[in-house]
């Protein structure tokens, strides 16, 4: 019989939730908030909608596409981030992101345990999935989709088929929060095809026929449920157009294929090879639906870095479901003792109390803007060594006007910290499209016509990394003068009087104020 201490010990899902929900905002907050400029952009979009009490239907933020039709397909998550920001500032946003990350992996561990996976294996698989997702722990809308995908996995691979209405409810909510519901539709399609193949070629069982009927009904219902948004069918056409814009995808870091010289990609490759070896040595054939999840998940991860975490919470999970029998049969006595210890703890432990206690403590931190008991536990501002905090502050104080060209990763921060200013481009590449993305690339890469493009867009100022080639070149360009410079950013403005013959002197001034080069982003 379990002792009282054992009954109140945290379960495996509770351990993952508490550990990640606390550790991420407390110790990984720098990457969480400063990982890219989209965090600031999403908060600004949400604040704009709260202020104007309407969704964003026409662009109010850029001078390159002013007033053009805008599809707010992430409006739900943006509103939630903005509401939390109003309550607890950036520290509150960090706390919310930590809770979402903790919830995603806690739900993954819970799913594996409920499906009967050995507790030690469930913990190892969940930890591996978390490692694969680490580089994408950024406070952006995709974190909501991680939770939704794990919930969907629990539905499609449940021991007993859930009620049909659960699927359209999930997808209706999901479609109003983030666009990765498309990944969920693909999962439903995979399970339909997988069960159909099992029924057709591997035995016409009653269970497989029922599964085919189930998913044949669920898939169209889920598709129709995604139309239950203010955008209607436009959310489909918008995502189709975005995912078909090869130039934008090829020139956006998270949409590129992984670089296998990076640590995360090497871990992905190790996980793939390990999973492949284990499946080859398995004495049982893998169900075709699960096999397709693994194949498709890894294929998508190879195509785009942003899909690596999704492979961790889908592909790895179904590999664990299949290999649980072989795992339990391993002859190691040492491993058997560890499995027994984990199994006993899993049966005797608690979850809800620990999750509620953790959420209560985190809510106090959030409401206090990161402070608790007089200590600043979570930072409440953007890192001024990553973003042009001082430069933007100086420009706002001086009421600097005119069209400004800013670095791509700084576009979202400019929207957030300088709301009076319109931007050339920001992280919302689905809106700007390939034409503006090309112009941005030609300017930032100093293509032969980069000055002509600035002229065509009537750009009055350039905000860029003070150690970039663009900063160096524009400092030497007649008709431009340095207006602001520090070790992070430089602002150059058009100045008709700056036509003298001393370009190298101006470049020396830039080097003097910028200081030595350092990798910051």
Image: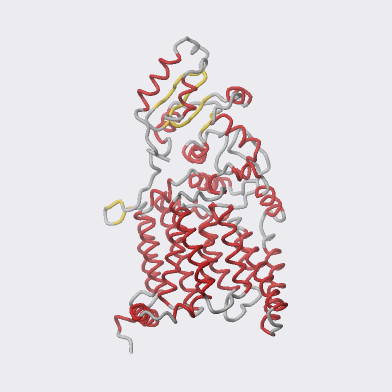
| Above or below, comparing residue 313 to residue 474 in the picture | below
Q: What residue is at 36 percent from the left and 59 percent from the top?
A: 23
**Image quadrant in which the N terminus is located:** bottom left
Q: Residue furthest left?
A: 374
Image position of 384 (left or right of 117)? left
Image position of 92 (left or right of 419)? left
Q: Quadrant of residue 436?
A: top right
**Image quadrant in which the C terminus is located:** top left
Q: Position of residue 357 (x, y in %)?
A: 36, 68
Q: Position of residue 513 (x, y in %)?
A: 36, 25
| Above or below, comparing residue 272 to residue 234 in the picture | below
| Above or below, comparing residue 23 to residue 458 in the picture | below
Q: Residue furthest bottom?
A: 1
Q: What residue is at 38 percent from the left and 48 percent from the top?
A: 30
The answer to which of 201 and 437 lies nearer the viewer is 201
Q: What residue is at 39 percent from the left and 65 percent from the top?
A: 359
The answer to which of 69 and 426 lies nearer the viewer is 426
Q: How many numbered marks does the figure carry?
A: 0
The answer to which of 307 and 459 lies nearer the viewer is 307
Q: Quadrant of residue 362?
A: bottom left
């Amino acid at each position: 019989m379990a002792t009282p201490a054992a009954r109140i010990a945290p379960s495996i899902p509770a351990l993952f939730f508490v550990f990640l929900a606390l550790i991420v905002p407390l110790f990984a907050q720098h990457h969480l908030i400063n990982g890219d400029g989209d965090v600031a952009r999403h908060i600004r979009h949400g604040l704009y909608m709260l202020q104007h009490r309407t969704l964003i239907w026409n662009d109010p933020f850029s001078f390159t596409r002013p007033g053009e039709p805008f599809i707010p397909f992430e409006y739900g998550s943006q509103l939630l981030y903005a509401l939390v920001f109003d309550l607890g500032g950036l520290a509150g946003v960090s706390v919310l992101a930590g809770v979402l990350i903790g919830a995603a992996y806690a739900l993954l561990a819970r799913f594996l345990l409920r499906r009967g996976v050995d507790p030690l294996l469930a913990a190892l698989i969940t930890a591996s999935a978390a490692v694969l997702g680490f580089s994408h722990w950024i406070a952006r809308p995709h974190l909501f989709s991680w939770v939704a995908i794990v919930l969907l996995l629990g539905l499609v691979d449940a021991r007993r088929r859930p009620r049909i209405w659960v699927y359209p409810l999930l997808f209706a909510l999901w479609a109003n929060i983030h666009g990765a519901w498309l990944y969920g539709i693909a999962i439903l399609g995979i399970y339909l095809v997988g069960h159909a193949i099992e029924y057709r070629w591997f035995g016409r069982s009653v269970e497989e026929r029922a599964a085919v009927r189930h998913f044949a009904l669920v898939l169209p219902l889920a598709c129709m449920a995604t139309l239950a948004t203010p955008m209607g069918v436009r959310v489909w056409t918008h995502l189709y157009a975005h995912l078909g814009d090869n130039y934008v995808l090829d020139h956006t870091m998270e949409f590129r294929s992984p670089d296998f010289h990076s640590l995360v990609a090497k871990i992905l490759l190790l996980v793939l090879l390990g999973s492949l070896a284990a499946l080859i040595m398995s004495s049982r054939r893998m169900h075709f639906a699960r096999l397709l999840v693994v194949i498709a998940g890894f294929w998508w991860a190879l195509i785009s870095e942003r899909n690596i975490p999704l492979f961790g919470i889908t592909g790895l999970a179904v590999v664990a479901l299949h290999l649980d029998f072989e795992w339990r049969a391993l002859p190691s006595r040492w491993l058997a003792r560890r499995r027994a210890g984990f199994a006993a703890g899993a049966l005797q432990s608690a979850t809800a109390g620990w999750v509620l206690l953790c959420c209560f403590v985190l809510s106090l931190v959030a409401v206090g803007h990161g402070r608790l008991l007089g200590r600043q536990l979570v930072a409440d501002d953007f890192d001024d060594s990553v973003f042009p905090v001082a430069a933007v502050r100086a420009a706002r104080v001086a009421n600097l006007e005119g069209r400004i060209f800013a670095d791509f990763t700084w576009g979202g921060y400019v929207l957030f910290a300088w709301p009076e200013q319109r931007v050339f481009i920001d992280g919302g590449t689905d809106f700007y499209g390939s034409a503006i993305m090309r112009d941005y690339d030609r300017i930032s890469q100093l293509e032969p016509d980069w000055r002509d493009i600035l002229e065509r867009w009537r750009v009055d100022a350039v905000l860029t990394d003070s150690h970039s080639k663009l900063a160096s070149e524009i400092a030497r360009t007649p008709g431009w003068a340095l207006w602001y410079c520090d070790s992070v950013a430089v602002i150059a403005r058009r100045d008709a009087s700056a036509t003298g013959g001393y370009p190298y002197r101006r470049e020396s001034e830039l080097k003097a104020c910028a200081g030595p080069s350092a990798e910051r982003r």
